[in-house]
Amino acid sequence: MSGLRVSSFFLGNSSGVNFSIVLNPVDEKTGKLHLANCSGSKRVGDWNLNVTRVRDTSEVTVSLTRNLQLCLPNATDCCTTPLCVVETLQVLACRDALVLAHLLVQAEIYANSSFTGNVSENATIIPNQAFKPLGSCPCDLTAGACDVRCCCDLECTPDLKQLFNESCFTGVFGGDVNPPFDQLCSSHSMEYTPDWFPFLCVQSSLNNTPFLGYFYHGSISTPRVPSFKIPLQTSPGRLFTGYRQGDPIMTEENEYFAIPQQSMAGQCVGNAPVAYLQNFDVKCLTNLASYKEGLPHDVRINSGTGDFIKQNVIYRTITNMDKFKTESENLHSAEVWCQNVTFAEHYTFIWKDKSIEQVNVTVFLGSLCDGEILTQRFTVKFLSLESTTPVEPFGNPGYQVGKLVRAANMNASDTFGSLNIWQPAGRGLCTSATYTPVLFGLDSFSGCLLEVDINEDCSILRGNVTEKLDSLIRATHIGKRVNSSYSDLNDWVEIIRLDPFNSDTNVSTGNLKGICSDIPANLNIRIIFATVGAVQGIPRQEILAVQISFSTVVWQFQCGLICENSTSFLPITSSVQFIKVPAQPPIPLTRFQMNYTEFDCNRNDVCWPQLLYPLTRFYSGEPYSQCLAKGLSLAFLVLLSAILSNPWFSTLW
Amino acid sequence: SSQLSSLPLQILLYINGVYYIFYFLATLTMIVYKSQVFSYPDDFLAPDLLVLFIMAILEVPRLYLGSKGNLTEEEAPLGLSLVLTLGSVVLAVYFLAWQTYVLRADLILNALLLSAYGLESGLKVMAIAAFVS
C-alpha cells in the first residue's frame, strides 16, 4: 500500500471470525514469516483495522493514523525523511485460535508533500522575459514544495521524481514551452528528411529561439482603475449648465432620476435613468413577490439651471383592473395577501430650452394580490412650452430613425393629421386592432384579420376594406422635416394616392358566392427620402415624396369539410417602405480624370504604385522588410558589378 | 637582401579573398532562404543583412592593406589590417552563434572563415615582428 488506507475482502462465512493485525511478521535475518499468533488486536502502533460485515463477505480496511507532514529531523510526530513509513503488516483471520486466512501488506508511504505552511508574502522574481520565457514550468504551482507530476519542477528531488516519472504532465503545461520543431538538427521526428537536410538544418539551441521575448516590449503601464461613479457636479449652480438632448435627468441628491424601462435584453430594469427629450412608453411585468417601489414622488428634480422643482403628483385609482392584471388560479382561496401598488405612472416634463419647467405625474394605484401578474405601464413625455406636440426644436431638424413621421391634413380645420399602420391585438381581428404611427426609417408590415360572411356582397366588401384602410391614412401631406410648421406649405409634400381601380360593374364574379376579386386588401406606403446635409456630423434626412397604393387580392371563402354558413377571415395588411435616393447625382468626372489614369490602379493596365513597391507602400502582398532586403541586395550586386568592371580594380588581382 | 615578406601570408590572403566571395554569396543566399522558410520576428532580418554587408565592406580594405603591407614590408598597413581582422572575427562569431537562425552550413562556413582569420592573424603578427626587427 502506498496511501493511508487499503482494503480487502474476506469471503466466506465470517461468523465467529476474529480479525487481528500483526506488525513485522517477517524475520529480518531469515526473511521467513513468523508463526501466526491469533492473539493480536485490531490496533497496533499507528495501524488500525476496521471490519465491516456485509452478508457473506467482510470488508477489511487497514489504515494509518499518523501525521505524514515532512518536518525537521529530530522532531516528533512527523516525518523526518521523504520516505516516511516502510513496514510490513499481516492481517489474520482466526476462528477459535485457528488461522483461516492471512493477508500480507507491505507499506511504503512517502511524506505528504503538499504545502500546508504559512504563505510567504515575498513575490517570486519574474525573470526578464527578453531572455527567459515567462512560465518556463507552468506546473510548478507551489513554491518551496514539490508539485506532483511536474517533471520540470526544480524543487523535486530525483528520488521523488522517480515516483511519478511515468505520468508526468506533457506538453506546454509540463514545461515543454518550446517544443522542438522539425527543422532542428536535433529533432529526429521526421521520417522523411530532404536531401540537403544535414546542411540546412537549424543548429541554434531551443533555449535561444528568436521568439524569446517576442511579445515583451519592456514598457510598463499603470493600470487605470475604472471609476464607475457618476461624475459629481460639486456646485450645480455654477457647473450645471442645462440639459442637452440625451443627458440624464438628475435629482436633488445628484443621483439619476430613474423610472423602470426596458433594457436591450428585453426585461425591465428598475434603475434606468431618464434621458432628456426622450419619450418612452414601456410595459413591465411584475408580481407581488418581485414588486419594488420606485423613487418616492417627493424627490425634487434638478431643473438644469440650478434650482430644484417638485413633482406635481396626482393620484388616481384604477377601476378597470383587467387591462393590467391577469387573474391567477388561487384568486378565490380564502386568504390572499393584497397590497396597494402603482399600476401606471405617466410623467409629463414641460421643458424650455435647456431646462425643465414643470413635472406633472399621474400615478394610478390599485391593489395587487398574491399570485397575480401585473403589467405596469410607465410613460414619459416631454412637452414644449410653446406647442403641445412633442417636438425637438434644436438639434437635427431632419428625420432620425425612430422619429414620428409628421403628417398633416390640410383639408381639416385643425390641420392635424396622422399616418398609421395596424397594430393587432388579442386574436388579431380588425375590430380589436389599434393603430400605431409610422416611424421614420423603420420598414414595417402589419395587418389584421377581417371577418367576412359567406354571403357578403363583393362591392360592399370592397367598400368596407377600402374604408378600413383609409382610416389609417388621415392626412393629405407629410412633413419634409421634423420641424415642418403648419403655416408653411413648402415644408410639406403631398401624398400621391393611387386609388384602386374602381370597378362597379360585376366584372368577373357574376353570381358566384364566396369569391370576390379585386379586393384592395394591401396598403403600400412608400416614403422616399434623401440625405440633404449634415448637422454636427449626423446626416440630415428629409422626406421627398410619399406614395400610397393598394394591391388587390382575390378573396375566397375558406370552407372546412362542408361549407357552413360561418365567417372566414380576410387578412388586411399595411406596409411601409422607406426608399433612399441620392439627393444629388454624383459629380461628373472631368475629361482629364477620365483620360489620364496613370495612378488609377483600377482602370490602368500598369499599376505604377504597386510596381514601385519598396518605394511606395501600396502593395500588400509581400512583407515590406523582405522586399526591402531583396531590393537592397540587388542594388548591392549591381554596384559590385559596376565597381568590379572598372579596369582599375582588375589591377588589384 | 633577404626577403622579409611572408609567402604563406600572401597565399592565405589570396585564398581568403576567393573564399570570402563564395562565403558572401552563400550566406546571402541562405539568409534569403531562411527568410522564406522560417518566420522572422519583427525586424530581425534587417540586422542580419546589415551585418553581412558591413562584413563585406570591411573585408576589402582588410585584404588590400594586408597584401600591400606584406609586399611593401611595412608594418603600418599590416597592423591596420590586423585591427580590421579583429572586427571581422567578431562579425564572423555573430554569424556563427548570435544569428537569428544558425544552420549547419552556416556553422561550417563560419568555422572555416574563423580558422582562416586565426591563421592569418598569427602570420601577420610574425610578419610584423620580422619587419620591425
Image (spheres, coloured by chain):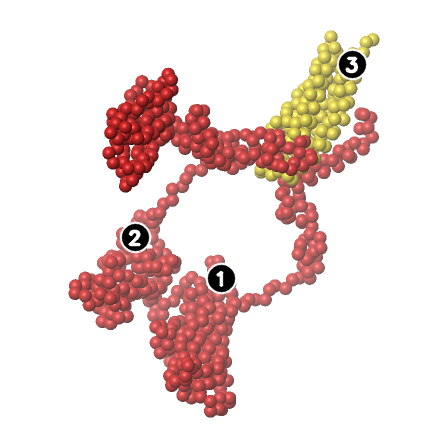
Chain colours: A red, B yellow
Q: In the rendered image, which residue does mark 2 sit on?
A: A255
Q: Nearer the viewer, residue A224 or A358?
A: A224
Residue beneath the point at 33% across and 53% down: A240
Q: Are there few (<14), some (14-19), or many (20+) residues within 10 Å of tag 2? A: some
Question: Quick check: A646 left or right of A43?
Answer: right
Q: Which mark is residue B5?
A: 3
Q: Is residue A405 above or below residue B1?
A: below
Distance between mark 3 and mark 2 Cα atoms? 97 Å
**What residue type is disc 1 on?**
Pro
Mark sitting earlier along the chain (2/1): 2
Secondary structure type for disc 3: loop
Please give left or right for residue A640 compared with residue A233 in the image: right
| Mark 2 residue type | Glu
Q: Work out whether disc 1 and disc 3 sit on a shared chain.
A: no
At numbered mark 2, what does the secondary structure look like: helix, strand or loop?
A: loop
Answer few, some or many: residues within 10 Å of disc 3's Cα (few below 14, many 20 plus, some between 14 and 19).
Answer: some
Q: Which residue is mark 1?
A: A539
Q: Are marks 3 and 2 in contact (CB under 8 Å)?
A: no
- In the rendered structure, the residue with mark 2 lies on which chain? A
Q: Nearer the viewer, residue A391 or A512?
A: A512
Q: Residue at the spot x=26%, y=61% of the render?
A: A287
Q: Locate residue A606, reporting x and y percent.
A: 71, 53
Residue A258 image position (x, y, % from top left): 30, 57
Q: Is residue A521 left or right of residue B29?
A: left
Number of residues whose C-alpha sits closer than 10 Å to that of mark 1, classed few (under 14), some (14–19) or many (20 or more): some
Q: Is residue A535 visible?
A: yes
Query: Pointer 1 indicates a residue of which chain?
Result: A
